[in-house]
Image (cartoon, helix red, strand yellow):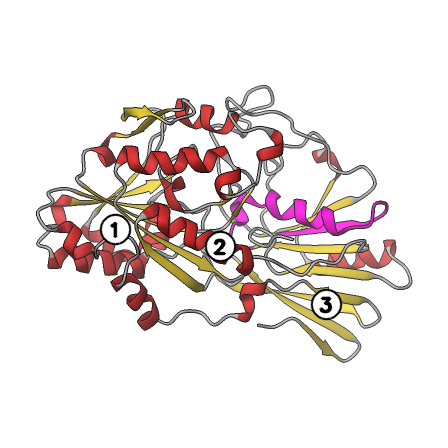
Amino acid sequence: MAEVKRKGNEQIVLLPREFWDRRDEWLLKFPESWKIRFCRMAGDNLFSLTPRHIKERLEKPVGCPPICQMARGKKEVAIVVDDMTRPTRAASLASYVLEELRKAGIKEHNIRFLVSLGSHGAHGQDDFRKKLGDDVVENYGVYNHNCYENCDYVGRTERGIPLKVNTEFMRCDLKIAIGAILPHLYVGYSGGGKIVLPGLSHIDTIDLFHSSLLPDQKGKAGDSNPLCKDIEEAVALVGLDFKIDVLVNTRGEIIDLYAGEPNTVYRMGIRQASRIYKSEFYPDQDVAVVNAYLKANEADIAMLLGFRSLKKKGGTCILVMNAPKGQMPHYLMRSFGKFTGGRQWVTRSRLPEETELIVLSEYKDMTSFDSFDSEERILWMKRWENVLEHLKAKHKGKVNVGVYPDGTIQYV
């Protein structure tokens, strides 16, 4: 994977761009005299899994029988996939699941795909094709989860969270899910049963689930986070039978995979995730360049990592963000006008006063940063040449630059 290359009197960094769309690269040029530190993620040292390796993992699930055995005698099957805020290219994984179901005698008209949106905005057919492939869209029903309607009450977690879950999902007697384990601001790592809670839950459940976390518990993983216990209990309450979870590098390639009983899969996966997503970190930089690639539609995650890398005064954070469809609508947490927003929408904070933020994007979107009340301080630029001109004018002499290939999944 390319890092920093020298060409003449310039240094060049290539960063991946538009995972779900054109999948090309940004070419960023820096002066020869600047100190460029490429903050590499540990998982980028690993080889991506081959189709043969993936199939071997799927054929030997942990904590439960293979899918073809579980499917025998079943009548209705739900296959749940995570949404477009996650870089899970689910087509090949879904193909394997469907083959196993065919072996068990399950007919196409008894299988449906559900997109685990939580309180995110609905997807269209182009999203379904990117996520699942043409074959699935053309031969099976694919449906968005609706967090406001068609949810059944299935019980309460031990902490008292009332669980209301997608009705279509609950009416199936075999429930399979495909997703990714990635760093997450609330539960430490996404994946596992989070595809159900909050992924297939009613807005009332989602609201209570998110608001029940104390500030000092936020971001912790496993047993130290009560939300993780709620999620594990939800897996049992809804009867999620089988989970496939992938881990990826900063190019979105699968570098690890776990399949089987959902809670077992998740616990195994997060142990590896704590190593894979750990990244090099250099503090007190003059400039931090943070790419939002795999989760470009939730780009403010990357911005926070950039600010952590800067010196306290005078630093510049550059958020590299190309999201053709803009930032994902969030019916719980984002705004829906100047005066209105979701149940947990608040103007959370101001951008750091002593530093500046440049957003490098070909798709300027004025609603991208509705969580901050200082949007007027953001500098939007469409070309790297303009960014570099600004940096040269502001930062003189020796300039230290930290570069993160994908700040949406890296953690330090």
Q: Residues within 10 Å of mark 2 (few under 14, many from 20)?
A: few
Amino acid bearing label 1: Val
- Viewed as shown, does residue 363 lie left or right of 272? right
Q: CA distance from mark 3 to mark 2?
A: 37 Å
The residue positioned 72% from the left and 67% from the top of the image is: 29
Q: Nearer the viewer, mark 3 or mark 2?
A: 2
Q: Secondary structure at mark 3?
A: strand
x, y (%) of residue 355? 80, 44
Disc 1 target residue? 137
Q: Along the horizontal axis of the image, is 79 left or right of 161?
A: left
- Occupied quadrant, residue 389: bottom right
Q: Quadrant of the N terminus?
A: bottom right
Q: Which residue is mark 3?
A: 29
Q: Give the residues in magenta.
A: 293-320
Secondary structure of the residue carrying tag 2 is helix
Residue at 35 percent of width and 37 percent of height: 196
Q: Which residue is mark 2?
A: 271
Report which quarter residue 258 is drawn in: bottom left
In this view, 373 is above or below 392: above
How far apart marks 1 and 2 lie (CA) works out to 34 Å
